[in-house]
Structure formats: structure tokens, C-alpha cells
């Protein structure tokens, strides 16, 4: 029976699992490599699948209160004209039982930390290796300290050290495009009435109301890996000059030191996520590009399913196999689907981009809604 769990990584997936385990009285230690509990990122949207998962551990309501419900969503062209129909998210939310909630990543992090207990998280503690023992596993940290447990959960992200030890599949795969993300100061720009993503040729811009007078935005563009910005606001304003309002206003309103640049990467899917007393979760298991908006959602799904499997199986091996059986196919489908969508959204060739836009305009609403349901519906009791 599992009584001591060590989680490497204090991000969304790791903290969700810690919150779930603590509800059942399992002793949890979270080891976070960052010196402070300050999540990297700006905003995110949690789909009905993520909200349904959080509801199972009593956190859907606090998460919803930390953000704003999305009522409508649309894809636009650079001039602001719709590419296809506008999705009535509120109607879809009623059908699925939960809505889409957009919020600042820091606020979600705080909700999870409050549930876990901040004293359960050790900061400035990077796990660099694991060693199996007869009665469990030992995690060795960069400072030489070690922590033993019945199970070690690798929730240490895209560049997971523990995945490297288990799988050894090298560096992540660069998608060919980079991103800039930011949040406007409260009240500086009127909040949009809908979530939107605008597509150009090799460039995109997304706008999301996250409540509290703030707007989360992201820009995406084809670029060599590891690029640097000399004057990020001026360069973004130049890149998106001529695009529809309020893109320029949003960039102008955001302080330059609050604009984050991140290369977009993923990894090829794998089908085995555990070895002995060690298991992968979230980006350590299935890092994906953000094109489907499911990175955080899939990490949250992982956490809830892993907790359920650990509670339902006496033997650890049986629990971890059940976790893989329930999660691997769905998460890997997301990885490949997000990769494909990114390739389409980033088309640069004028003819190919025109054909893409025409196809989007001709896509029946029923097709788009069916795809949305597949993304957002999940049975946690399966």
C-alpha cells in the first residue's frame, strides 16, 4: 500500500496530484527546483475536462473564482474577419457539465498550493537521479540530499531529468516557431467579449480575458530556435503592424519586462511511462505544443487518474499499469493532434494559407463541435 509519495516538480500537474493524495491522507513531499514558488507563464484556459478533474478533488469552484468563464470563441484572420463560425462555448459547457475557465497561471498555482499546504513543498531542491531500493525508491537532489518514498512521480517538465534517466530520448523537438506571452496591467485595455486567435502566414496572435481587468495574450511566429529580442515591444508591434485591433493596443499596454519569449517544443510520444517505483506525469510524460490548449488540462487529468489508480490497486505495479492504460492513448493523441494543428496554423505559403482559410470557412459547425467534444469529454470512472 502506498503511504509516502515524492513528487519532483511543483507545477500544475505535480501540485494537483499532491492535493489529491493529501485528501486521502497520503504523505506527500513536493520537491521544486525553483528558489521561489513563482510559476513561469502568463495565462491559460482550463477546458471542461480539466474543470471536471478539479471538481473531483473539490477545486473546481476555487479555480473558477480565480478566473473568468469563456462564453464565446473564434478564429480570425489578420484583418479580424472570422475563419469559420463562432463557437458558443457557454452552450457547449452546459452540455458537458463544466465550462472553460481562463485565468492567470499564478492564481491557479495559488489555488493548488492552498490545497496542498505550502509547507509540503521544498523549494530550491532539484531532483537529479533516482535509485530503486528493496522497499521503494530514493530521489537524489542536486545538493546531495536524498528523499525516500514508496513512489517517485516525475512531474519535472519538458526537460525532465528523471525522464532522461528512464527513457533517454534526448532533447525535445523544436516545432519551428517561438512564442511571446504577456498579461496587460489591470484596466489598461477593455476586456474582449470572446476568446480569439488570429491567423496570418507563419504568425498568430491570441487574446483571452482572464478576469480582474487583465488580458492574457500570446503571439506565435516562425523563427530559428533560441532567438533573442533586442526591443521586444517594438519588434512585436512591427511584426503585427496592420493586424486588427486591439492587438497593437495590447502590446503597447504590456510592460516589456512582463513579456516572456519561449520556443515551442514537444517530444515524440512514448507508450511506457513507468519503471519500478517511478512514474512520469504531465510534460515529463507527454510534452505537447500549446496549439490545442491542453497542456495543463492533460497534466491535471494525469494527476486525477493516477490518484484513482493508486487508491484502487493494492499492488503498485498494477496501479501504474492501469494509469498507463487509461492515459497513454489519450495524451499521445493530444500530442500529435496539437503538432498537426500547429503545422496548419503556421502555414506561410500564400496559396496554402488561402486554401486553409477557405477550408475553415467551409467547415460545418457540427464538425468543429464534434472535435471539441472529443477534446473536452473524459470519463474519470472508466
Image (cartoon, rainbow, N blue to C red):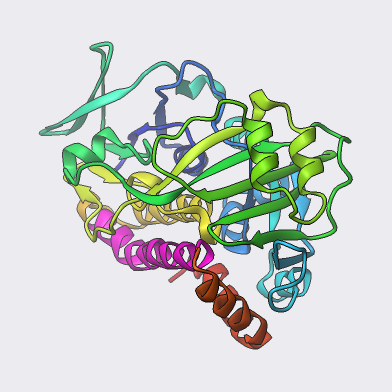
Q: Position of residue 190 (x, y in %)?
A: 89, 45
Above or below for 307 versus 137: below
Q: Position of residue 377 (x, y in %)?
A: 55, 71
Residue visible at 53% across and 61% down in the picture: 292
Quadrant containing the N terminus is top left
Quadrant containing the C terminus is bottom left
Residue 323 is a magenta residue: yes
The reply to whether residue 258 is in sight is yes
Total of numbered circles in the picture? 0
Residue 38 falls left or right of residue 25: right
Q: Position of residue 153 (x, y in %)?
A: 32, 39
The reply to whether residue 104 is in sight is no
Residue visible at 10% across and 34% down in the picture: 134
Looking at the picture, tell me which residue is in the foreground, 56 or 358: 358
Above or below for 22 versus 95: above
Residue visible at 17% across and 37% down in the picture: 165
Residue visible at 56% across and 49% down in the picture: 220
Residue 325 falls left or right of residue 330: left
Span of residues in magenta: 318-346
Q: Residue furthest left?
A: 134
Residue 253 falls left or right of residue 149: right
Q: Main secondary structure of the magenta part?
A: helix
- Name which quarter of the figure residue 158 lies in: top left
Residue 272 falls left or right of residue 46: left
Residue 106 is a magenta residue: no
Q: Position of residue 144 (x, y in %)?
A: 23, 12
Above or below for 220 versus 120: below
- Name which quarter of the figure residue 368 lies in: bottom right
Amino acid at each position: 500500500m502506498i503511504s509516502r509519495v515524492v513528487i519532483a516538480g511543483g507545477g500544475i500537474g505535480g501540485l494537483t496530484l499532491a492535493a489529491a493524495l493529501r485528501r486521502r491522507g497520503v504523505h506527500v513531499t513536493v520537491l521544486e527546483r525553483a528558489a521561489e514558488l513563482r510559476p513561469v507563464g502568463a495565462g491559460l484556459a482550463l477546458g471542461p475536462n480539466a474543470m471536471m478533474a478539479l471538481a473531483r478533488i473539490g477545486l473546481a469552484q476555487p479555480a473558477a473564482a480565480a478566473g473568468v468563464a469563456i462564453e464565446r470563441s473564434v478564429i480570425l484572420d489578420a484583418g479580424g474577419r472570422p475563419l469559420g463560425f463562432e463557437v458558443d462555448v457557454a452552450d457547449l459547457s452546459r452540455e458537458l457539465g463544466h465550462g472553460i475557465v481562463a485565468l492567470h497561471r499564478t492564481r491557479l498555482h495559488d489555488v493548488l498550493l492552498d490545497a496542498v499546504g505550502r509547507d509540503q513543498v521544498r523549494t530550491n531542491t532539484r531532483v537529479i537521479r533516482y535509485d530503486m531500493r528493496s522497499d521503494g525508491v530514493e530521489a537524489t537532489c542536486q545538493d546531495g540530499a536524498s528523499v525516500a518514498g514508496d513512489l517517485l512521480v516525475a512531474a519535472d517538465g519538458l526537460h525532465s531529468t528523471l525522464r532522461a534517466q528512464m527513457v533517454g530520448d534526448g532533447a525535445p523537438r523544436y516545432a519551428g516557431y517561438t512564442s511571446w506571452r504577456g498579461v496587460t496591467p489591470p484596466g489598461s485595455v477593455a476586456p474582449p467579449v470572446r476568446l480569439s486567435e488570429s491567423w496570418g502566414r507563419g504568425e498568430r496572435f491570441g487574446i483571452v480575458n482572464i478576469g480582474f481587468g487583465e488580458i492574457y495574450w500570446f503571439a506565435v511566429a516562425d523563427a530559428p530556435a533560441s532567438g533573442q529580442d533586442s526591443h521586444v515591444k517594438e519588434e512585436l508591434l512591427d511584426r503585427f503592424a496592420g493586424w486588427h485591433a486591439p492587438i497593437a493596443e495590447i502590446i503597447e499596454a504590456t510592460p516589456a519586462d512582463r513579456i516572456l519569449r519561449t520556443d515551442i517544443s514537444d517530444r515524440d510520444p512514448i507508450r511506457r511511462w513507468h519503471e519500478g517505483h517511478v512514474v512520469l506525469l504531465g510534460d515529463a510524460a507527454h510534452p505537447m505544443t500549446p496549439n490545442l490548449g491542453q497542456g495543463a488540462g492533460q497534466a491535471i487529468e494525469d494527476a486525477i487518474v493516477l490518484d484513482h489508480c493508486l487508491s484502487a490497486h493494492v499492488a503498485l505495479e498494477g496501479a501504474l499499469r492501469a494509469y498507463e492504460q487509461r492515459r497513454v492513448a489519450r495524451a499521445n493523441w493530444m500530442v500529435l493532434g496539437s503538432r498537426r494543428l500547429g503545422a496548419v496554423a503556421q502555414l506561410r505559403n500564400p496559396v496554402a494559407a488561402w486554401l486553409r482559410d477557405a477550408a475553415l470557412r467551409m467547415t460545418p459547425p457540427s464538425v468543429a463541435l464534434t472535435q471539441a467534444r472529443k477534446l473536452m469529454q473524459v470519463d474519470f470512472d472508466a
